[in-house]
Amino acid sequence: MAQPRDERLAEIRARVEKADAGPWTVRRGEMHGVLWIPFVMGPRGTIADCGDESEEDNAQFMAHAREDIPWLLAQHAAMWDLLTLLMDDDANRATHGAAWDAIRGAVELAPREVDR
């Protein structure tokens, strides 16, 4: 069963709050005589050893997640607030008719899409 959108977002926010504040960066080091192994570093040290140089993209993804996820959560909240405000305005439906019905339908599906 799909997890409700609000519950899932609350869990994501809780993980964000528990994680080191950052900044998180990618550094390269030496392991077993091999140079340029990417490590994701936080204020308290290594967060992840990404294994070998082919994992650079994964290391960059993890390092940027510390800033990207809070930003995405804020964008989601702002958009959801706007959509909720617009959905509550009957004048929008009267003015835009079928287009407004399509927007409402997409918003009502949004919680299911987030849970995929």
Image: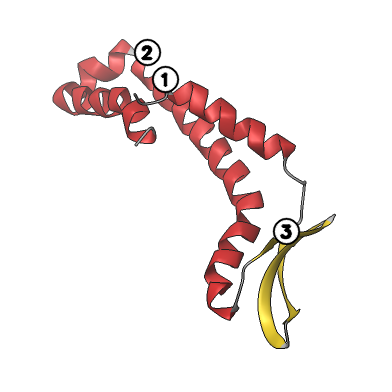
* Kind of residue at badge 3: Trp
Identity of the residue drawn at 19% across and 29% down: 99
Lateral position of residue 22 relative to residue 70, left or right: right
Q: Which residue is mark 3?
A: 24
- Residue 24 in percent (x, y) is at 73, 58
Nearer to me, 70 or 115: 115
Determine whether 43 is above or below 81 in the image.
Answer: below
Lateral position of residue 64 relative to residue 84, left or right: right
The N terminus lies in quadrant: top left
Determine whether 50 is above or below 20 in the image.
Answer: below
User: Closer to the camera: disc 2 or disc 3?
Assistant: 3
Task: Determine which quarter of the picture holds residue 23.
Answer: bottom right
Question: Which element carries disc 2, helix, strand or loop?
Answer: loop
Q: Which residue is mark 1?
A: 84
Disc 1/disc 2 C-alpha distance (Å): 6 Å
Identity of the residue drawn at 56% across and 61% down: 61
Question: Which element carries disc 1, helix, strand or loop?
Answer: helix
Q: Which residue is mark 2?
A: 88
Identity of the residue drawn at 62% across and 42% down: 70
Disc 2/disc 3 C-alpha distance (Å): 41 Å
- Residue 62 in percent (x, y) is at 60, 58
* Kind of residue at badge 1: Thr
